[in-house]
Structures are given as structure tokens and as C-alpha cells.
Amino acid sequence: MGIGNSKLVREAATLVSGNMLAQVITLAAYFVLTRIYTPDDYGLFNIFYSYIEVLIIFSTCKYELAIVVADDEREAAAVSRFAMRMNTLVSAGLLTVALVLWLTGLLPGNLAQLGWMVLLIPPLVFFCGTSRVYSFLYNRFHRYEMIAVSDSVNAGSGALLKIVLGLFGFSQSGLPIGTVIGQAAANINYRLRLKSLPNAQAIRNIPNSERRAAAKKHRNFPFFVATKDFINTFSSNLPFLWAALYFERAEVGLFGLALTFTMQPVNILSVAFERVLYARTAETVRDRQPLMHLLCRFLLPLMAVALPIGVLAGFVAEPVFVFCFGDRWQGCGVFVQTLLPLALATLCCNSLMFIPNVFSSQRTEFVFYLVLLALRVAAIAIGVGVGDFLLAITLYAAAGTLVKASLLLWYLWQVRRYERTL
């Protein structure tokens, strides 16, 4: 037990250290970027990236998650190649649609504000999708240092290019262009290191029949996980996809910066924890070994550290934002305070979000996210109806906190039910 847990800590530390470096680079760049770009520019960028987060789900249909739970390396390679092919086809289709809509002047809703920048959406979807497949392939073989390096390459190159473009007058397009280039650089880094994986040549030479068979075997991922993630991502981006149509873009930008500094550290940490725990949990369940002690030894220290940090952040958020980024970003602190309970619930819940994949309970999980979507739609509708953006965000965050906490309890209940079968 001691050896296994120490190995888990080392693996998590490798991913977290790399992700923390990427996080430090990204967040440190904001000290410069917020003095180059305005809240209005960030509001437009948040609208742009909200479409990426939704479309990326369809580019791979979440087949990358099946790489970790595949029965053997051959099956993992087959499902990864299938996901790569799907990502290429979907990205090509998106490029065709975006080009037609832009040329004909028929861009709908918020897309009309983006103009020619809609053409950046398909390549970013492609690079994000490919990088996700590679990251889970490396995760399968416990090559966490390679994932950490690619995250750092993405953050560093993207931040540098955003600064350079902003200084040269690309006020609105600098942020999305820098994001595309940063993700492309991470993608290249993954590809260059692919030969270091075991049986790298065999991974490339998988016939179509095996790819289709692997895809059929793991069809729960596109049917339930991808649909669930679409609902979750769509509901998470409602402030940008829907509320932004009715409120000032600068106000949306203030919320976007607060969301970045509140949720981005949480997302990076939870992704790192989830990747390590996912592989370790899948192995533990395949070996029919107890699991609860492993998860509790992770969750309890995490909550003990995160809770006081969150309370402190709530008190100092507003003066810190104004001091670091300038007077024009005044108001971010209020949004941070609203989002902190959601951040804590998300950190704990998302670190264990692989549990339904391990126990094939994706159908039940799907219901939680349907409830979340309904609650968040109601929250934004109320805010839009009364013309109060802060109220919309407060209700939106409260809905997320309630559902995430409920999901966490359900995850732990599934683990306890599994242990009763041992």
C-alpha cells in the first residue's frame, strides 16, 4: 500500500508540476496582456473560445477516454487511431461550414462579432482534439512528464505570441491567434515524442477493421460521455453563448477574467489528478483490489488545503485584481467571490469524474448533467429577464455547486458499492 501510494504521489506530482508551470506562465502573462487588451477584447475572446470548448467534444466524441480503459495496448492503439481519424474529418467539415458562412455573410448570433476569426475555430478544434488523444495515450503508458512538457509548450508559446501580436496592434485577433499557435506547438511536441512509446510502430499500423471494432466496443463514450460532456460544456458556456447577447461585452470580459483566475487553476489541477487517478483506479479495479482508501487519502488532504485558500481568496480578490491589472478591471473580485464555492466543488468532483467510465455507469451520470443544464438555463433566463448579469452568474454558480457536490457523493457511493462485491 505504501509503495503504491508513494508512486501515485510521484506521478501526480509530475503532472501537477508541469501543469503548474504552464499555469504560472499563463497567469503571469495576464500581468502584461491585461494592459495590452481591454475587457471588451477579452469578452470577444471568451465568446470565441466558448465555441471551441463545445465543438471539441464532437471532434473525438470522447473516444480518447477509452484509451486508458482498453484491455490491452493493441486495443488502446486502435481506439486512438479511430479518434484521430474522426477528429480530422470533423475539423475539415467545420472549416468548410465556417468558410461558407463567412463568405456569404450569414454568420449567426455571436459568430457575427467574430467575423473572419471564425476561420480560426476549425484549426484550433483540430489541434485540441489531436492533443487530447495524444495526452491520454501517454497517460496509458504513465509518461506524465511528456504531458507536462506539452502543457508548458502550449502555455509559453501561446502567451508569447499573444503579447507580441497585441504590441503590434492586433487588438482583437491577437488572443485567438496566439491560442491556435500555442496549441499547435503542443501538438507538434506530442508527435515528436511519439516514438518513445512502447510498440510505437504497432500503434501506427492498425487496420481499419480493428479501429471500427474498438470504436464499437467503447460506444458508450460517444453515446453517453460525449453527450454528457456536451451538455455540461454547453451549460458552462451559457454566459458567453447566450448572456453575452444581452449584456455589455466589457462586463462579459470582466467575468471571463475572473472565471480564468478562479477556474483555470482548478481545471488544470483536477485534470492532472484525474489522469493519474484514472489510470491507477482502472488498474486497481481490473485487479479486484479495494479502492476507497486510495481516493480518501487523496480527497481529504485536497479539501483541507483548498478550503482555507478559497476563503482567503474571497477576501482579497477585488483589491488584488485592481492592483495587478489596473482600474479598468475593477469588478472582477465580485465575480471571483461568486465562483469560489463552485471552484471547490469542481476541484473535488472533477478529479474523480472518471468513476462512471470505470464502472460503466455513464447513463446515470447523464441525468445529473441534464439537471445541471436545466438549472443553468433557468439561472441565465432569470438574469436576462431582470437585466442583471451578476444575478445570472450568481444563480449559474449556485446551480453548478449543487450538482457537482451531488456528483461527488454519487461517485463515492459507487466505489463503496464496488468494494462490497470483493
Image: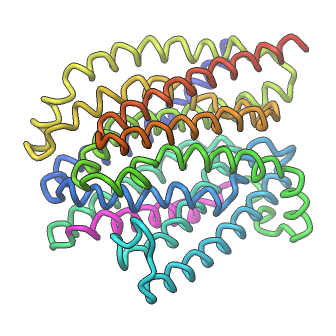
Q: Residue at x 86, y 10 (%)?
A: 420
Magenta-highlighted residues:
171-197
Q: On the image, which quarter does residue 281 sit in?
A: top right
User: Where residue 32 sits in the image (x, y, percent)?
Assistant: 16, 52
Classified by dominant secondary structure, the portion drawn in magenta counts as helix
Picture layout, residue 167 above or below residue 296 = below
Q: Quadrant of the C terminus?
A: top right
Determine whether, in the image, residue 362 is placed left or right of residue 106.
Answer: right
Indicate yes or no whether the magenta region holds residue 176. yes
Count of picture labels: 0
User: Where residue 24 sits in the image (x, y, percent)?
Assistant: 31, 41
Q: Quadrant of the N terminus?
A: top right
Determine whether, in the image, residue 312 is placed left or right of residue 196.
Answer: left
Indicate yes or no whether the magenta region holds residue 152. no
User: Where residue 322 sits in the image (x, y, percent)?
Assistant: 12, 37
State the residue in front, 206 or 58: 58
State the residue in front, 413 or 33: 413
User: Where residue 171 sits in the image (x, y, percent)?
Assistant: 20, 68
Q: On the image, which quarter does residue 37 sit in?
A: bottom left
